[in-house]
Image (cartoon, rainbow, N blue to C red):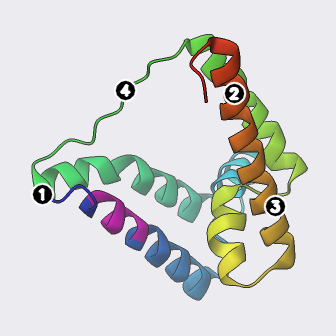
Amino acid sequence: MQAYLPALVGGAMIGLAAVLLMATLGKVMGISGIVSRGISSSDGRGWRTAFLLGTLVSPLLWRLITGVTPSIEITHNIVWLLIAGLLVGCGTVIGSGCTSGHGVCGLARFSARSLLATLIFMATAIATVTIVRLVSGGGI
């Protein structure tokens, strides 16, 4: 199997899911919004639950089709990962959305706000990786 194939298929599936969600329900596919509104409101809980279950089941489907299990390797301290997750959650609230909502759907709709949000996401990610590598002695 070509190394790029999983990324190509995954990207196509994300795009298809975004288009189908917008075309059928008129909703933007932003994971942070889907999760937060699924927890805080009973409105649309059915499709939100189905969508999230689909994201969890998709690696199993990939295994069934290709015979290859996607690998996940956690190499960092779980406490730092939890702190990072909380910071990302706070950032999605402050930014009124996440990378999937702004970066995938917002950019596809030519939203200036989403372009700005995505540029900030990327700049923050680059700065964070650079700082962590410098502090940990890994170099840039």
Q: Circle 2: is it few (<14), some (14-19), or many (20+) Cα within 10 Å?
A: few
Separation of residues labelled 4 and 2 (CA atoms)? 17 Å
The range drawn in magenta is: 6-11
Q: Which residue is mark 4?
A: 73
Lower sequence index among marks 3 and 1: 1
Residue count near mark 1 (Cα–Cα under 10 Å), binned few <14, some 14–19, many ≥20: few
Q: Quadrant of the N terminus?
A: bottom left
* Horizontal and vertical percent position of residue 78: 56, 14
Residue at mark 2 to residue at mark 3: CA–CA distance: 18 Å
Q: Residue at x 85, y 57 (%)?
A: 96
Q: Point out which mark residue 84 bears.
A: 2
Q: Is residue 44 visible?
A: no
Instruction: Specify the label residue 1 is tagged with.
Output: 1
Crowd around label 4: few <14 · some 14–19 · many ≥20 (10 Å):
few
Can you identify the residue that label 3 sits on?
117
Query: Looking at the picture, does residue 14 appear above or below residue 132?
Result: below
- Please check the rendered image and state whether residue 51 is part of the magenta-colored stretch, yes or no: no
Residue 86 sits in which quadrant? top right
Q: Nearer the viewer, residue 3 or 53?
A: 3
- Contact (CB < 8 A) between labels 4 and 3? no
Question: CB of mark 2 within 8 Å of CB of mark 1?
Answer: no
